[in-house]
């Protein structure tokens, strides 16, 4: 009788170990599947930033080529330098985001990956979005003036400086509209819509995948 009880106890222990192993395997497989989805979900962000990097280099070269070929006119130097600085900013911001993405260790605990994604979200929302909202409202002006000068040989700033002033006012209005949208979102409690859009769809999908993993691990 004692031998039968010992055998039953041993069988139950073996069964429990197998169930624990199977459960651990299920958690691991689920985690790997979600992390693979996360990794693939961040690829559009990597591609987008790589394209931005290329365009940044293009604007750097464009601005440099313009101001170095017009060293005798101060405002034309200013136009070229502004476009060159814009290109440098594009390269720097794209490099920063690519670094944050490539720094993610998908074998690390969920909390560590969430911390990395939080850093990526914070950079995009608190730094990248505000900077490009301001710069984007005005950078089209030097690009527009340079293009006219190159295409038809007219120095708009030199001939009609007042017109350039109106372009700057248009840029200011554009920036004011962006600020108005932000203020309205803040006042109506919808800032999450602004921050989520600034973070980007790829980041939101990655965060959702991690939340699914965390819920699954807690449930098991």
Image (cartoon, rainbow, N blue to C red):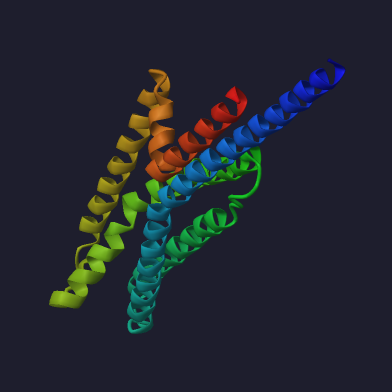
Residue 23: percent from left, percent from top:
61, 32
Is residue 217 visible in the rendered structure shown here?
A: yes
- Drawn side of residue 81 relative to residue 137, left or right: right
Decide: is 8 above or below 69: above
> Depth check: 19 or 181 in front?
19
* Quadrant of the rendering where the N terminus is positioned: top right
Which corner quadrant of the image does residue 68 belong to?
bottom left
> Depth check: 30 or 18 in front?
18
Furthest toward the left, the residue is: 152
Residue 40: percent from left, percent from top:
42, 51
* Quadrant of the rendering where the C terminus is positioned: top right
Which residue lies at the image location 54% right of the left edge and 42% below the top edge? Answer: 29
> Depth check: 27 or 37 in front?
27
Decide: is 60 above or below 121: below
Furthest toward the front, the residue is: 1
- Drawn side of residue 128 relative to residue 99, left or right: left
Furthest toward the top, the residue is: 1
Which residue lies at the image location 32% right of the left edge and 44% below the top edge? Answer: 172
Which residue lies at the image location 33% right of the left edge and 75% below the top edge? Answer: 62
Which corner quadrant of the image does residue 117 belong to?
top right
Is residue 157 visible in the rendered structure shown here?
A: no
Residue 14: percent from left, percent from top:
72, 31
């Amino acid at each position: 009788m004692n031998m039968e009880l010992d055998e039953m106890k041993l069988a139950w222990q073996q069964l429990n170990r197998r169930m624990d192993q199977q459960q651990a395997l299920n958690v691991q497989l689920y985690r790997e599947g979600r992390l693979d989805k996360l990794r693939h979900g961040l690829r559009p962000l990597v591609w987008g930033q790589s394209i931005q990097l290329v365009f940044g280099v293009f604007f750097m070269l464009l601005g440099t080529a313009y101001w170095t070929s017009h060293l005798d006119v101060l405002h034309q130097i200013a136009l070229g330098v502004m476009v060159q600085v814009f290109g440098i900013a594009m390269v720097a911001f794209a490099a920063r985001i690519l670094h944050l993405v490539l720094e993610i260790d998908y074998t690390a605990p969920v909390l560590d990956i969430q911390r990395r994604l939080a850093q990526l979200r914070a950079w995009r929302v608190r730094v990248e979005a505000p900077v490009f909202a301001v710069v984007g409202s005005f950078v089209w002006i030097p690009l527009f003036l340079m293009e006219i000068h190159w295409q038809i040989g007219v120095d708009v700033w030199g001939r009609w400086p007042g017109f350039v002033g109106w372009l700057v006012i248009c840029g200011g209005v554009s920036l004011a509209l962006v600020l108005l949208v932000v203020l309205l979102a803040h006042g109506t409690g919808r800032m999450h819509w602004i921050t989520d859009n600034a973070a980007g769809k790829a980041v939101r999908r990655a965060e959702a995948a991690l939340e699914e993993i965390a819920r699954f691990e807690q449930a098991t």
